[in-house]
Amino acid sequence: MNIFIGNLPYKIEESELRELFEDYGEVTSLKIITDRQTGQSKGFGFAEMTDKESALKAIEDLNAAEIYGRNIVVKEAEPKPEGARKPFRSGSEGGYKGGGGYKGGGGGYNKGGGYGDKGSYSKD
């Protein structure tokens, strides 16, 4: 069973969280979600437990438990809706030397990115 864990304190380590859930049964995976650029926790994560009964007991006991001064949220994870996330980059986003802008596809480093044009800063 997949479990959502929210309102996590930023300083908690995956090993600490795993220990907490292992008191209820086998944890097959546990992941705290982090920001790609900074590596800092986003304050939520997921645990996967093999036994549904154990997982439900963990949810019941740990929801609203206080950890490092924060009351965590523990509940059954909802499946991600199909197609809910957009790709990380699309053709109109900026980047190093290309893409971006509001409509025009400029943007990025040394390419501008004005409103509705091919770039308004500078061109190589």
Image (cartoon, rainbow, N blue to C red):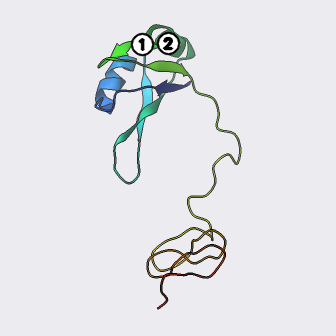
What residue sits 49% from the left and 89% below the top? 123
Could you say where residue 58 lies in the image, as x and y percent from the top left?
Answer: 47, 13
Does label 1 or label 2 sit earlier along the sequence?
A: 1
28 vs 89, nearest the viewer: 89
Label pair 1/2, CB-CB below 8 angstroms? yes
Placement of 23 over or under 77, stated as above or below: above
Placement of 16 over or under 99, stated as above or below: above
* Residue 87 located left or right of residue 67: right
Amino acid type at circle 1 is Tyr
Amino acid type at circle 2 is Ser
**Residue identifier under label 1:** 24
What residue sits 36% from the left and 13% below the top? 66
Q: Give the class, few, some or many, for how many residues have Cα within 10 Å of label 2's Cα (few <14, many ≥20).
A: some
Disc 1 to disc 2, C-alpha distance: 6 Å
* Residue 89 located left or right of residue 83: left
What residue sits 51% from the left and 23% below the top? 50
Could you say where residue 71 lies in the image, as x and y percent from the top left?
Answer: 40, 16
* Residue 97 located left or right of residue 92: left
Q: Residue reaching furthest right?
A: 82
**Residue identifier under label 2:** 54
Choose top left, top right, bottom left or bottom right for residue 10: top left
